[in-house]
Amino acid sequence: MKKWIVIVILLVIVVLGASFMFKSHNETQQKENTTEAYEISENGVALTVPSTWVSAESKSNMTLLAVADPNSKDSSGFSNVNINVEKKETINTLKNEFESNYKSLSRNSDYEILYLGNATVQGNDAMEAAYLTTGGSVVKEHKAVWLQGDGEIYVILCTSPQDQFDNYEPIFDYAINSVKIS
């Protein structure tokens, strides 16, 4: 009888110890995977990005908001990872403008179209494109989501080096789904 009691006590200790270690490991993983986020707003556009990201400058005159990961600078000091929100005034429909844009890009050998299709952002119809650019020293992957509202088209363009895109895609998707246009 004493053997059974000792075995049961040892079994309880092993189970409790394993569950404590599992819980501790999960809490550590959650802390490591959690990045604080903040909402950045400019020119009537807001989106949520990691708290380490900063406001950035864009070469495009159509940019309403640009943010970048300051830890991803290239040798020239420019960020390789960024999100730009642009506004395009047009008389065309979203689909026509989208198709025209990527038809034109596909003729340029510096662009490789990976995907063109429909998307949904916050329950609204959108268009999505994925493509590579090879014009610089680093091959970059881009995800562009096109939305239409109030007669204007908004493009959320997410960019990173191709070999890092999978790591940044959850951040890009979170930012895209947090966008607010006023």
Image (cartoon, rainbow, N blue to C red):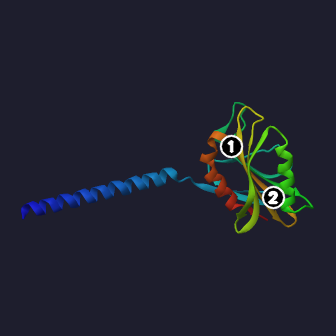
Establish if 116 lies above or below 181.
Answer: above
Instruction: Please tell me the numbered disc located at residue 154.
Output: 2
Establish if 75 lies above or below 97.
Answer: above
Mark 1, residue position = 160
Which element carries disc 2, helix, strand or loop?
strand
Around disc 1, counting alpha carbons within 10 Å, would you say few (fewer than 14), some (14 to 19), or many (20 or more)? many
Instruction: Please tell me the numbered disc located at residue 16.
Output: none
Residue 94 can be seen in this image: yes
Taking the spot 42% from the left edge, 55% from the top edge, the residue there is 26
Which element carries disc 1, helix, strand or loop?
strand
Q: Can you give x and y, in whole percent of width and height, for residue 121 in the image?
A: 71, 64
Q: Relative to 161, is 2 on the left or the right?
A: left
Around disc 2, counting alpha carbons within 10 Å, would you say few (fewer than 14), some (14 to 19), or many (20 or more)? many
Establish if 19 lies above or below 67.
Answer: below
Q: Can you give x and y, in whole percent of width and height, for residue 81 in the image?
A: 68, 43
In this orientation, which residue lies closer to the viewer: 12 or 97?
Answer: 97
In this orientation, which residue lies closer to the viewer: 32 or 110?
Answer: 110
Q: Can you give x and y, in whole percent of width and height, for residue 1 in the image?
A: 6, 65
Q: Please, what is the three-letter code of the amino acid marked with disc 2? A: Tyr
Taking the spot 85% from the left edge, 49% from the top edge, the residue there is 103
Q: Can you give x and y, in whole percent of width and height, for residue 83 in the image?
A: 72, 49
Q: Please, what is the three-letter code of the amino acid marked with disc 1? A: Ser
